[in-house]
Amino acid sequence: MKQRLLALLFIVQLLPLGVWATLAVDDTFEVNGMTFKVTSIEPLEVQVGIGKSGSPAIDISTEGGVVIPATVTGTDGNSYSVTAIGFCSFRQCKNMTTITIPNSVRSINSEAFSFSAISSITIPNSVISIKNDSFRYCSETLTTIVVEDGNPVYDSRNNCNAIIKTEDNTLVLGLSLIHI
């Protein structure tokens, strides 16, 4: 009886730690004011934002630079790799001027930055998918685009201020300041 009571007390003490609350695909959680959505549990991966219009990943009044972390700890205590920027994640963030994307991110989804006020963006060499309208209506504020050397899919050759799909020379994003 005493052993059962001790075991029960041990379990009750663990409950506030969320031991029983494991996350599943499509579950969401917030870390430092940024929302994440679980996209895979094997391996543990998340995207920034929940992927719905009108539901940005951060408060749209956030000012200045925003840094996307490479990994985040979920409410279940597990470490998740941030591998995508979801649909509309930073849409209409009119006070956000810069964004830092970690090398863990592989895809940037539709309208991820549309109507935002970012002035510069560097695409890491890990990004292998960018939807054509990811930066829709950013041309008024976006002045610098760089694709890191070694990206297997995209380039911004000769510092041309554009994102070009290397394989077929498709222009994904270009600014009025393009010089190819």
Image (cartoon, rainbow, N blue to C red):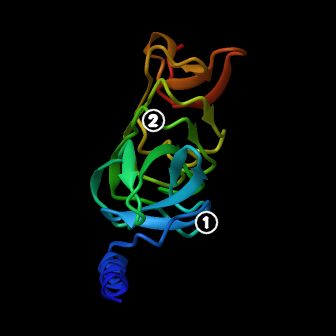
Quarter holding the N terminus is bottom left
N-term-proximal mark, 1 vs 2: 1
Q: Is residue 32 above or below residue 71?
A: below
Residue extending farthest to the right is 168
Residue 18: image tag:
none
Question: 132 and 178: which one is in front?
Answer: 132
Q: In screen coordinates, is 120 left or right of 174?
A: left
Q: Which residue does the image show at 49% across and 38% down from the upper left?
A: 105
Residue 119 point in image, percent of width and height: 37, 41
Q: Which residue is mark 1?
A: 53
Residue 106 point in image, percent of width and height: 55, 35
Q: Which residue does the image show at 68% across and 16% down from the upper left?
A: 169
Residue 126 point in image, percent of width and height: 50, 27
Quarter holding the C terminus is top right
Q: Which residue does the image show at 43% across and 21% down from the upper left?
A: 148
Distance CA(mark 1)–CA(mark 2): 24 Å
Q: Which residue is mark 2?
A: 104
State the SS at label 1. loop
Q: Is residue 117 visible?
A: yes
Residue extending farthest to the front is 1
Q: Is residue 165 above or below residue 16?
A: above
Q: Amino acid at mark 1?
A: Ser
Q: Amino acid at mark 2?
A: Ser
Q: Is residue 38 above or below residue 1?
A: above
State the SS at label 2. loop
Q: In screen coordinates, is 180 left or right of 95?
A: right
Q: Nearer the viewer, mark 1 or mark 2?
A: 2
